Image (cartoon, rainbow, N blue to C red):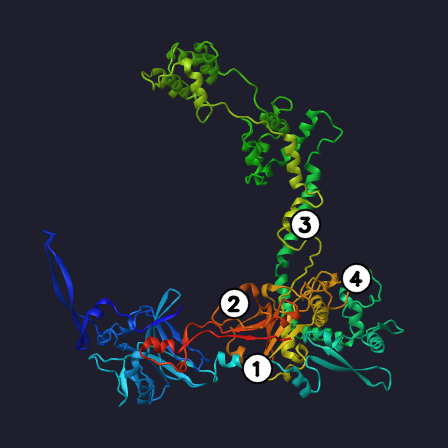
Amino acid sequence: MARFVARYERALRLSALDGPINGRLQGTAAVPLADVANAGTTDVANAPFELFGPGDVLRLGPGAITRRFPAPGAHDAEETKLALVEFAALDLPWRYTPAAAKKNDVLRPWVALVVGHRSADEIVLRSDGRVTLGTVTQAQHPLHDSWQWAHVHEVDGHQIARILGPLNLEAENDYVACVVPAFTAAGDPTWTGSAPVTCDCYDTWTFRTGPQGDFPDLAAKLHKADLAAIDAAGGKPFGRAEVSYELRTPGALATPVETAGVLRLPPASAAGPDPADSVIANDIGDDVAGLSVRIVMPDGRGVVTAPRYDAPFGDPNVGPDPAPGGWQEQLRRDPRLRGAAGLGSWNAIEWQDRIIAAAATKAGDLAIAHDRIRHVALGVEASRSLWRRRMPPPAGSAVVDPALVLSAAASRLAVLGPVLGRLASRSGATVLDDISGRSPQLGQALLSSAARRALRSGPARTALAQQGAGRFGGVLIAASLCPPDTADPADIGRSGGDSVEAVKLAVYTATEDKAIAGQVLDRLGEQPSEGQLVAALRALAPNQDGKPDSAAIAEFLDGKEFPDSGVSPGSWSGWMKETAPDEQCRPLDLVGLSKAVAAAVDPTADPPPAVQRVLSTLPGLTHIGPVEIEPELDIPLWSFLAQRSPDWMLPGGGDLAEHDVVGLSTNPAFVEAFLVGANFQAEAELRWRNIPLVTRWSPLRKFWQRAGGELDIVPIKTWPETDALGSATLDEGHGAEAVAAFRTPLFRRYPATVVYLYEAAVDWTPPDDKVALDPTKRKDPTFTGTIGDDITFFGFAVPPADLATHWVVLEEPPAGYRFYDVPAPGSGDNNSAEFAYNRFATPVRVLIGPLL
């Protein structure tokens, strides 16, 4: 609930005394005092203070003004509203006023908003940033009334400080607005009206008012069109056109044929069938069909005849004669629908550059696609050759010997090993990462190209090796297996064995030099501690050359003390299992891995995996043959017809009177015929420009500019040949839709007006203006447009019959809070809050209906 407050003051102003000195209020404030040493000793002192006045203000800080109305630079401002400024600080309008107000007194703000024309008698903006106010402007802004202009507005939990400009604006005039001080530095009124005054200017902007009237004025004039009067005045039914067709028979007279345009009156069941939907006479249909019959001269040359608009989209496997009653026959025999298709063809001719540009944008990635496809095609052919020459064959299904199957799989993995590091696995890592470490000897290096080079035949390391030891497949088999279980020195003590033997086994395992091993064992003794054994094994560890470090061994043998954890050899079993647990080993299924890896990269598969991966980056392409596209061009065609041939958008639209509102229906048959003609011409143009279209494609499927980019028709090549134009199978599920058309200047001046349908009560009782409407009963438009300069239409995704049960609602566009220049009738202004309340402009909502 909105509420207005006359003023807002801080505490010091409320305690100031009237009677300023040098333009500043004076006063005293009671200051409580307390003894720091003795908190119980208190006193009160009257401290004098002085408040800043208007002479202390040089400028307003950034952000001090939060809104200006009309907006700076506006060229169509409402002349019925007052100019205003809003402030961020609630007390700013009265903060520096050199006067103190009593409880029920009015208080003049220290600043004012003056509005006027730029002239010597009104407002002159000076080069030094100041402003000269002429006597006319002073008379229009009497300062003794300035207490009315400032207030605080409380609404929806927010507070707004505001100053109104009291000037009543005139239509179609240029204005300048200035925020100026209302008091001089001495505390006197800045102007009295006797002579021009120059003062500071804290803010200024310009605007221009529009024609006389505002949204409520224009909306109140809207009414349902009197179609009977329009028909009588025009001598023909509104919404229908009449065309004449003259048979080619010599002496034949022109036959009038009634038709409809893109928008038409909804069918009225009581009035019978609409003549615009009548079946065309056979003699006319035969005559029209003959215009497009192919003619071949005796020498074989063809004669140019009328176009067959359906030809590029028909099924080539179907005979030449169209299905009776189907859309193809209609486009060949009905001059009305051929005319609509001709308009679409004209549209495509006129907009050919726009269509080509849109298609080129859609086809902009073709160069990238061609490049990727050329590369993948070359790569597939090269890899197929290498695959057939280098890849060992898998074991055949007849092979039952597991050893032979394993050997064949290992041989194939030997060739595929380098790719494992680039082949992604289901874990998110690579196959190489997943299989490395499954067995102690299966490391990443073993599956690298370097390992293959190291094991190639020729060098001594392979030439002198045991027969077959250098075969890489055999190495993979050996590395993928877990090593055989052997005696663990740590298990000797745990199983009751001899711990002395365990120590010997550990040392002899660490070095093959029996002499050095004997020296180390002598140095350790029969019962070494954990720390001693660790020091011995560390000394026996090989260096970077793979040989024991003699210096480290000598240092161990000469050492006197060793780090000792106090663990006896009998406890080594548990200690070693904790510090060096058994190495995990999971044998690798080489046969399964070989099949999975080969399937992921096999270039001889159909299709090769590489081709599938590349095509996945090119939506709409399914092969690596010649690239053809099915572009959907985002070009709504209604605007062409509305600009170049508006009579076909709404026949008789020019007969509507100003402020008329009429309920209409879309005409799907006309729209579909129009789009067939547009696609007929556009397809030929695109192919001539070397845009590689898929055969029978229809790139223009938008007539209306629908919310969400929805299309109006399905691809023409999918239209059943037996279905007529306007059938549900031809469009995208829209069918005939309700349309409300207005002939009014309201939408030019208020283009953001909100329009929607709202379900009406049975008795058509209008809903309360002060109550929010139920959103579940509201239907917003799905498309909109204009015809000519002053006809605006809104389409709704509901049947046209719904116009008989719904209000058409217009809501004033939100533009912030505004105030009329005259008070409400019978109101009085005792303070600035009442002044604002009596002029507050609440948003206007207009309901019109029923339109049918």
> Relative to residue 704, is residue 472 depicted above or below?
above
Mark 4, residue position:
315
x, y (%) of residue 290?
Answer: 84, 75
**Discs 3, 4 touching: Cβ within 8 Å:** no
Quadrant where the image shows the N terminus:
bottom left
Mark 2, residue position:
773
**Discs 3/4, front:** 4
Marked residue nearer the N-terminal end (3 or 4): 4
**Discs 3, 2 touching: Cβ within 8 Å:** no
Mark 1, residue position:
659
**Discs 1, 4 touching: Cβ within 8 Å:** no
Marked residue nearer the N-terminal end (1 or 3): 3
Label 1 and label 4: CA atoms lie apart by 49 Å
**Res 565 seen here:** yes
Marked residue nearer the N-terminal end (1 or 4): 4
Label 2 and label 1: CA atoms lie apart by 25 Å
x, y (%) of residue 631?
Answer: 66, 62
**Res 512 seen here:** no
Amino acid type of the residue that numbered disc 1 sits on in the rendered structure: His
Say which element carries label 1.
loop
**Discs 1/4, front:** 1
Is disc 4 surrounded by few (<14), some (14 to 19) or many (20+) residues within 10 Å? Answer: some
Marked residue nearer the N-terminal end (4 or 2): 4
**Discs 4/2, front:** 2
Say which element carries label 2.
loop
Marked residue nearer the N-terminal end (2 or 1): 1
Q: In screen coordinates, is 293 left or right of 604?
A: right
Label 4 and label 2: CA atoms lie apart by 52 Å
